[in-house]
Amino acid sequence: MRIVVLTSGVRGIASRVLPALCNNRNIDVVKLVVAHGLSPDRKRNLRRKCRKAIKIGFLGALNGIRMRDWYADKDADDIHMVCRDFNVGLSETPFINCETTEEAFRQANADLGLSLGNGYIPKSVFSIPKFGMVNIHTEILPDFQGAQSIIWPIYEGRKETGFTIHQISNKIDKGVILFQKRYPIQFCSTLRETVEMNLKTARMNIPEAFSYVCQNYTSLAGESISQEDRRSYTTPSIWQFFRMARNHRKMYKESLTERSS
């Protein structure tokens, strides 16, 4: 299986997944593409940010900026170094939806594309590989489409999280499900620590999951599960965040009781 990888950051999940792919003899990673920045359409980007800020409120937007650090993968290696170590060709493009990215994908002539740490990918890009592209969503689908990891299950009072590898379609996080792993949320004393702890668990399991999906893609695609339309989550408003924090305190205390019994 010939693979092309698309990522939007030099440090992140792509740096963790690439070694697992390269160590699989049934997979040939022909190119990794790093797309820098957002679309150059500044007005469109500003309108999108304003709509989101209006939806979640000013305090929710500020809190969302504060929470970004919770999700940063600070221990990941620089993707340039990883590509050099595994002799993988690397192309850099201005942003995802541009002719340079499309040309890099066409030159790769890949069977399957992987999205590792990106925003919205247009059809003009994801349709280029023979079998399209797949994406990792670090939450359970279809229950938590668009959701940031861990916090929304806690908001809903659930004690389970996980990750899903799905086909990319025109709608975010709504393509057919190829692979899914679920596990209990590990509760820590603060919500931030709980998010970071469970993301660490996900990052440990995701590389081998992608290796498995790439090696067995055709059979998994034949058994894929279609998604129903569900609620799409986003950055929480400040009131939603307060509910998350309140639920987390309750569930953390319950977990302590369960451990001691």
Image (tube, helix red, strand yellow):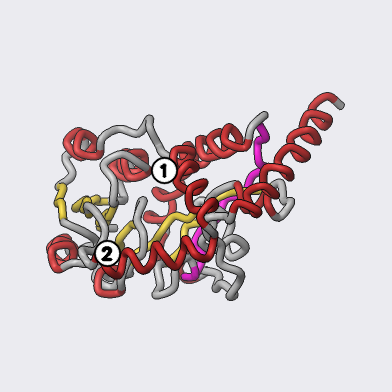
**Quadrant for the N terminus in the image:** bottom left
In magenta, the rendered stretch is 174-188
Distance from label 2 to label 1 (Cα)?
19 Å
Residue 109 coordinates in the image, percent (x, y) = 18, 64
Q: Pointer 1: what residue?
A: 207
Q: Pointer 1: residues within 10 angstroms few (<14), some, or many (20+)?
A: some
> Is 192 drawn above or below residue 152 in the view shown?
above
> Is 92 drawn above or below residue 79 in the view shown?
below
Residue 27 coordinates in the image, percent (x, y) = 29, 51
Q: Residue at x 51, y 61 (%)?
A: 146
Front residue of this view, candidates 21 and 173: 173
Front residue of this view, candidates 67 and 199: 67
User: For numbered disc 1, what is the local secondary structure?
Assistant: helix
Q: Residue furthest front?
A: 58
Nearer mark to the viewer, of 2 and 1 = 1
Q: Pointer 2: what residue?
A: 111
Does the magenta-highlighted stretch encompass residue 181?
yes
Q: Residue at x 30, y 62 (%)?
A: 112
Residue 253's quadrant in the figure?
Answer: top right
Amino acid of disc 1: Pro
Q: Earlier in the sequence, mark 2 or mark 1?
A: 2
Q: Residue at x 23, y 62 (%)?
A: 110
Q: Is residue 235 left or right of residue 14?
A: right
**Quadrant for the C terminus in the image:** top right
Amino acid of disc 2: Asp
User: For numbered disc 2, what is the local secondary structure?
Assistant: loop
